Amino acid sequence: MSERTVALVTGANKGIGYEIAAGLGALGWRVGVGARDGRRREEAVAKLRTGGVDAFGVPLDVTDDASVSAAARLLEAEAGGLDVLVNNAGVTGGGQQRPGDVDLATVRTAVEVNVIGVVRVTEAMLPLLRRSASPRIVNMSSGVGSLARQSASAGEHETGPLAVAYSPSKTMLNAVTIQYARALADTNILINAACPGFTATDLNGFRGVRTPQQGAAIAIRLATLPDGGPTGGYFEDAGVIPW
Ligand code: NAP
């Protein structure tokens, strides 16, 4: 394992993922820029390098077994392993998902990327993470995945639009995070779910009110937790989110 901390950020070619890569790179870490499109990936790597980040491209489609296995092999060859995995790649699913007017393909897409994609990448990277001195996993969830906030009594919090695909996919991702935290409780791997807040990115047509840099902050905090820090938690900048 290399002396320097090595991170992989999925969906790092733009938006919040790009800023997570930039923030971790600013710490002097080596950062794998996970992205499925070659041109967008290499543009992001070049921009990060111009900013002084030791970035390298990791071809990665989280919905594709072969792509994810190849990414694990590339990390081994290029960086000698992996210390920190940020599962950031995510989609809304795109199409109709308002209860009463649901396109099932939209639900499948959201679950395939936001849930199964995270499980696929995590399973592939665990053997590398287990060799690290201070491994961390951050799952980029959303506050709209909180069942407490989705319920009618959610009150003041942003609950997001009614959605049968996106919000429930993040709820399942939260449960997945808890399952891994329990399984890894007797290891040094800390795994937590994060909400970036409503951030201006492609995901919401740039309607978000936070900058991608602000959205990246909570993931960077959870990626840099000290040994013995929290695991199996769900956090935003303001603190703990109710499940
Ligand atoms: P974004 O700008 O749309 O970025 C999403 C990233 O995920 C892109 O790099 C995209 O790559 C990548 N991606 C999508 N499907 C992929 C796949 N199959 N394989 C690999 N990469 C894939 O959105 P964002 O707002 O930065 O979202 C980042 C994360 O934050 C997501 O998990 C999202 O759910 C979460 N989040 C965002 C907000 C918000 O307000 N923006 C709020 C709560 C949570 P391409 O460029 O190739 O499509």
Image (cartoon, rainbow, N blue to C red):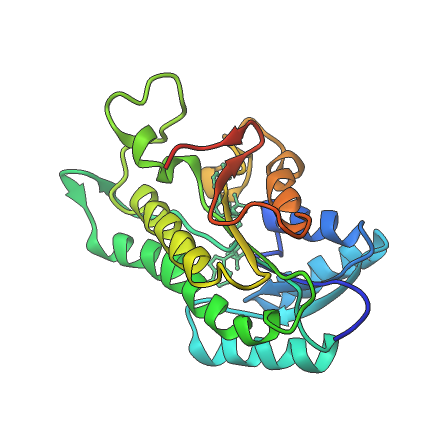
Give the residue drawn at x 73%, y 47%.
23
* Looking at the image, residue 21 lies above or below residue 203: below
Q: Can residue 87 be seen in this view?
A: no
Task: Judge left or right: residue 49 versus residue 17.
Answer: right
The quadrant the C terminus occupies is top left
| Quadrant including the N terminus | bottom right
As displayed, is residue 142 above or below residue 84? above
In the rendered image, the vertical position of residue 229 relative to residue 125, given as above or below: above
Residue 193 spot, x, y in % from top left: 48, 46
Q: Single out the residue that lies furthest toward the top.
A: 156
Nearer to us in this view, 61 or 226? 226
Q: In percent of the image, x 77 and y 61: which residue is there?
A: 46
Residue 18, image x and y in percent?
65, 51
The furthest residue to the left: 100
- Location of residue 134 (image quadrant): bottom right
Instruction: State the image quarter where residue 36 is shown.
Output: bottom right
Q: Is any atom of residue 139 visible in this view?
A: yes
Q: Which residue lies furthest to the front in this view?
A: 186
Q: Residue at x 35, y 62 (%)?
A: 112
Q: Which of the two residues, 60 or 177, is positioned nearer the viewer here?
A: 177
User: x, y (%) of residue 34?
Assistant: 60, 64
Task: Determine whether, in the image, residue 120 is placed left or right of residue 29.
Answer: left
Report the number of numbered marks: 0
Image coords of residue 196 (percent x, y): 54, 38
Identify the residue at image location x=67%, y=38%: 213
Q: Residue 144 lies in what quarter of the image?
A: top left
